Each structure stands twice: as structure tokens, then as C-alpha cells.
Image (tube, helix red, strand yellow):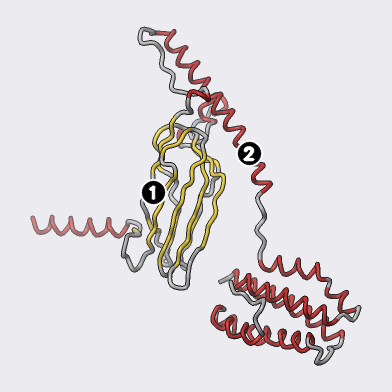
Amino acid sequence: MLYQALLKLFLASAISAAALPAWAGEGDADYPIIKAAVNPATSTVGSVVEYRVTISGKNLKDLEIVKPGMDVFYPESAKADKNRKDNPASLVPLYIIHEARKEDRSTSDLGYVMLIMKMSYYRTGKHTLPEISIFGKDRVRIAYRVPELEIKSINDKSELADIEPPLDLSGNHFRLIILAAALIALTLIAVVLVKEIRRRRNLRLETPVIVSPLEIFLGSLEKLGPERLISDGKIEEYVLGISMIFRKFLSLSYRIDAAEMTSDEIDFLLKRVMPSAAYERHGGEIMNFFHLWDISKFAEFTPPVEMLLINLEQATRLAVNLHNGKENE
């Protein structure tokens, strides 16, 4: 009987351990090291704090990092309140995420990724920050130690503080004072919240739009006006312009500096940074373009207009194919 009980206990422990997510700890070869911190650890209602999650390890390209889906988050008690319009407290969110960005500072030897979020909380107390979902290549979620944040009331200068009635008050008089204090506090929080939402909208309008290497390539081509240059016989200006634009596209797409490289140097580097299948499919075509532009640029011969127009169309299509292939990696 004792043997059977111990065996059942062992099996139950093994099943429970298997159901838990992977834990990223120091020295674990299979999982990266994940550390999280909030600064400051103690703040006030409406103040902006920085929540930073750092991930380091050797194989970070297989990780999937899922940022929180909601910028404005309400606590479960407010979500379940069916009379939110009649309850001012339910209109106050738990927190707002103003900004969330990912920075990749990886080197050739070590992967290093940071997820940085700017947040503000609007309910006092100790709160566990939202956990960022991080999945390994085996689709197992990797857990990490989530920090806590303590939110206090705004100081007296901002006219918001914990209000306590005199000890000798009681009955309805006491309830009225508590109700008045709560309404004042909620009004001040609502004012701060409205100002913050307006500021956030202004910041959103001022935030620069991140464009892809393909969009930069197509925009640069439009500014160059290649068809006009070809039709006007300005061949050297065309081949110089499209050569530099395509070099910039490769530099942005594969994180290299191809601006001052020769075509052979670019070919050598692309063999190292491009996926082998992509290089086998497009490497020769890329080099054919550069060879045509090089001999045209140095006036060894002048290609006919029809050849240059076909070259322009093929170079544009190649940039689209390289971009789409990289998006699907």
C-alpha cells in the first residue's frame, strides 16, 4: 500500500511538472535568460514608469515575443460591472500602455533583445505588471519573474490624498464624508486621465512611421524618375542612381553596408547573410544587375533604351520578391 501511494505521488508530481511552462534561468542551455524590471518600483497615480524585459541567449531568432494586446486595461471587477456608466470607479482603467518597442542589440556571438514599455497606473496598491508572452521554437511559453509596482496617491500639492474622517464621526455623516472624498478623488483621476489621453493622441500623431526597405526603395525610385532619365538619354545618371538605391535596399534588408562595396564584395557578403535558398535563387540575378550598371557607369558601352527599361522592371520585381521572401522567413 505504501509503495503504491508513493508511486502515485511520484506520477502526479511528474505530470504537474510537465504542465508547467519552461523557466528561463541562469545557465540553462535550452532557454534564454530573461530578466524584467520596472523603474521606478514605487510611483503615483498617472505617473509614467518604464517596464523593461531583456532577453539574452544564443538562439533568439526562433523566439516569438507577443506584446500585450490592449493599450488600456481595466481590472476584472470593472469588466464584470454591468452598470459602468452608473459607477464612476469602473471608468478608471488599471493601466495604460503609452509606448511599446523592441530593440535588437544582438551581436554575432550573443543575442540580446529588449522590450521596453512606457506605462502609467491609475489605481493605488501593489500590482503585478503584465507578463510578456515569450515562446520558444517548441511553442512552449518561457516564464520569467514578473516585477511588482506599488502605486500611491498623488501628493498633497496635487490635491489628491488619502482622506480620513474624524474618529468621532459615525452613521450617515461618516458615509457622506467617505462618498464626497471618493467623488473628489475620482474627479481628479478623471482629469488626469483625460489629459493623459489627449497627450497620448498628440504623441501618436508625432510618432514617426516606420517604413520597410521596399517602401524606401520604391520611394527613392520615384524621386529618381528613371523612365525620364532613360528617355532623355541620361544613361550614366540612371545607372548611378539605381545602383545606389539598390545598394541601400540590400543594406537595409540584410544589415550590411553595401554603399561603398564593389559588386564582388557585395556578392561575397550576401553569400554569408542571405538564406542559402534565397541566394541560390536570386544571387546570380543580383550580380547580373550590378555588372550591367558597372559597365554602363564606366562608359564601356551604352545599353539600348529597351534593355534599360527591362532592367528597371526586373530590378523592381526582384526587390519585391526579396522583400516578400524575407517577410515569409
Residue 210 relative to residue 81: left or right = right
| Residue drawn at the location 58% of the way across and 71% of the way down | 255
Residue 240 quadrant: bottom right
Which residue is farthest bottom?
300
**Residue 305 shows which numbered tag?**
none
- Whether 265 is drawn above or below 229: the answer is below
Assign a secondary structure to mark 1: loop
Of residues 119 and 106, the one nearer the viewer is 106
* Label 1 packing within 10 angstroms: few (<14), some (14-19), many (20+): some
Of residues 189 and 318, the one nearer the viewer is 189
What number of labels is visible? Answer: 2
Residue behind mark 1: 146
Residue 328 quadrant: bottom right
Tell me the CA gap for discs 1 and 2. Answer: 28 Å
| Residue drawn at the location 39% of the way across and 55% of the way down | 35
The residue under label 2 is which amino acid type?
A: Arg
- Whether 263 is drawn above or below 113: the answer is below
Residue 274 quadrant: bottom right
**Numbered disc in front, either 1 or 2:** 2
Q: Earlier in the sequence, mark 1 or mark 2?
A: 1
Q: Position of residue 51 (x, y in %)?
A: 46, 48
**Is disc 1 in contact with disc 2, using a CB cutoff of under 8 Å?**
no
Q: Position of residue 310 (x, y in %)?
A: 80, 82
Of residues 145 and 203, the one nearer the viewer is 203
Q: Position of residue 304 (x, y in %)?
A: 86, 88
* Label 2 packing within 10 angstroms: few (<14), some (14-19), many (20+): few
- Whether 313 is drawn above or below 115: the answer is below
Residue behind mark 2: 199
Q: Position of residue 179 (x, y in %)?
A: 48, 16
Residue 68 relative to residue 127: left or right = right
Assign a secondary structure to mark 2: helix
The residue under label 1 is which amino acid type?
A: Val
